């Protein structure tokens, strides 16, 4: 989106600083929620009926949400790991039947990569956390 010179002049640098402060307030809460959703996915993938087609569909839906949340929150490594889980679950869904034990072991291995990656993150490791307000004002100023 292009801004005219008059629009750029109206953008308040203090507003950019306030926005950055709000982001820093929100990231820890959403980071905790992301970790909770990843734990929930792990529970789903280790449940006795995890290999069933319906359970795979539910797990894929959650993996897809985790993928999006990881990217939106600025955790690129979490996004990448969740993408691998999501893609594999989509492949299993395409078969339209229950998954074999070896297929579920592959999903669980990919999930373990996701879990380890996510557990290594902190709110401060988010790219949103580390974005400098001057980058916003330079873009619009």
Image (tube, grey):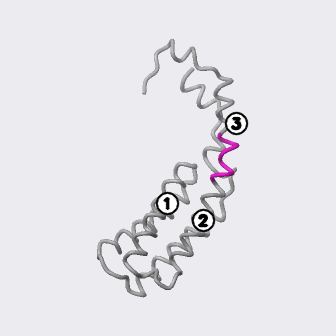
First to last magenta residue range: 23-30
Q: Is residue 99 above or below residue 112?
A: below
Q: Residue at x 40, y 81 (%)?
A: 52
Q: Is residue 132 above or below residue 77?
A: above
**Residue named by callout 3:** 21
Q: Which secondary structure dominates the residues rendered in magenta? A: helix
- Which residue, given by chain and number where applicable, does mark 2 sit on? 117
- Which residue does the numbered mark 1 point to in the structure image? 80
Question: Which residue occupies the extreme left position in the image?
Answer: 95
Residue 25 numbered mark, or none: none
Give the mark nearest the N terminus, 2 or 1: 1
**How far apart are the two marked residues, 3 and 1, measured between alpha carbons?**
27 Å
Decide if residue 3 is on the left or right side of residue 127: left
Mark 2 vs mark 3: which is more N-terminal? 3
Q: Earlier in the sequence, mark 3 or mark 1?
A: 3
The reply to whether dot 2 and dot 1 touch (C-beta < 8 Å) is yes
- Asked whether the residues under the numbered discs 2 and 3 touch, taking CB atoms below 8 Å apart as contact, a structural biologist would say no
Residue 63 locus on image (x, y percent): 48, 64
**Which residue is pictured at 68% across the width and 30% down the height?**
17
């Amino acid at each position: 989106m292009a801004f005219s010179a008059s629009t750029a002049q109206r953008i308040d640098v203090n507003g950019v600083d306030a926005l950055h402060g709000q982001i820093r307030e929100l990231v820890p809460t959403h980071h905790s929620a992301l970790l909770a959703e990843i734990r929930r996915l792990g529970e789903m993938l280790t449940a006795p009926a995890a290999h069933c087609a319906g359970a795979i569909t539910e797990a894929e839906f959650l993996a897809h949400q985790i993928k999006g949340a990881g990217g939106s929150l600025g955790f690129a490594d979490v996004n990448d790991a969740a993408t691998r889980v999501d893609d594999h679950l989509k492949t299993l869904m395409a078969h339209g039947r229950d998954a074999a034990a070896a297929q579920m072991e592959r999903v669980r291995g990919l999930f373990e990569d996701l879990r380890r990656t996510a557990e290594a993150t902190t709110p401060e490791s988010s790219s949103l956390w580390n974005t400098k307000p001057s980058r916003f004002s330079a873009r619009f100023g």
